[in-house]
Amino acid sequence: MNPSLQQEQFQEKILQNVETIIGFQAQRRQNLPKHQLLLESIATAFGQPWFLYAELIFFSTWGIVSHLFQSNSVDWGVPQFNLREQGIGVISLVISTGVLIYQTREEEASEERAHLALQLNLITEQKIAKLIALVEELRADSPDIRDRLDPEAAAMQQTTDPQVVIDILQATFNPASTESEIETIS
């Protein structure tokens, strides 16, 4: 078989697996209530570096403007920023935002590693299924080896469809699912 054709088939299997996983994630996101999506969007914004920069600019501007208006005898109604009184609160907010940004970045890296591990597991499972099929074919073709039916090997030759696994997991973990739904998935 042509090596470029093999590589193309291999890449196609990976693409199918990725599309299945992306479809699963998109379906989960569609099933979330609107208020949950809004809260997640807000929380995601708090975990971005621009939010920390915005905090620093805001508090710096407030401090400078407050100091300028304090030295002026005219009261403009600007709330006073006192580093002694509000400093610990501001520092706590900046530190917690920094920690949230770090955790967000680490979560994204962890999610990428999990996707990579999942892809490697799916590919490994497909390769093992192919090896089992080749061994069974070799056993059937070899005159020295007794030909027998092995139902377990026949079952292991089939690669697992990620969509079927996702459907079974959803039916199993969904308390509203019935046994008839699980049977229709199988």
Image: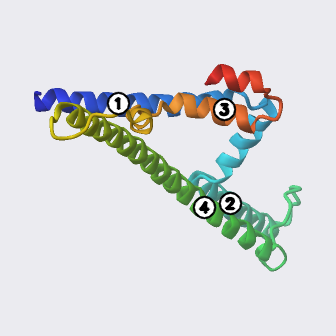
User: Callout 2: 10 Å neighbours few (<14), some, many (20+)?
Assistant: few
**Lower sequence index among marks 2 and 1:** 1
The quadrant in which residue 55 appears is: bottom right
Tell me the quadrant of the picture where the N terminus can be found.
Answer: top left
**Lower sequence index among marks 4 and 1:** 1
Q: Residue at x 48, y 30 (%)?
A: 161
Q: Is residue 25 visible?
A: no
User: Callout 1: 10 Å neighbours few (<14), some, many (20+)?
Assistant: some
Q: Which residue is mark 3?
A: 28
> Disc 2 or disc 1, which is closer to the eye?
1
Picture disc at residue 63 = none
Q: Residue at x 79, y 30 (%)?
A: 33
Report the front residue among 61 and 7: 7
The amino acid at mark 4 is Gln
**Lower sequence index among marks 3 and 4:** 3
Q: Do callouts 3 and 2 mark residues in contact (Cβ within 8 Å)?
A: no
- Where's residue 139, x and y in %? 23, 37
Q: Element under label 1?
A: helix
Q: Which residue is mark 2?
A: 61
The amino acid at mark 2 is Thr
Q: CA distance from mark 3 to mark 2?
A: 42 Å
Q: Element under label 4?
A: helix
- Where's residue 142, x and y in %? 16, 36
User: Callout 3: 10 Å neighbours few (<14), some, many (20+)?
Assistant: few
Q: Which residue is mark 4?
A: 103
Q: CA distance from mark 3 to mark 1?
A: 23 Å
The amino acid at mark 1 is Lys
> Disc 4 or disc 1, which is closer to the eye?
1
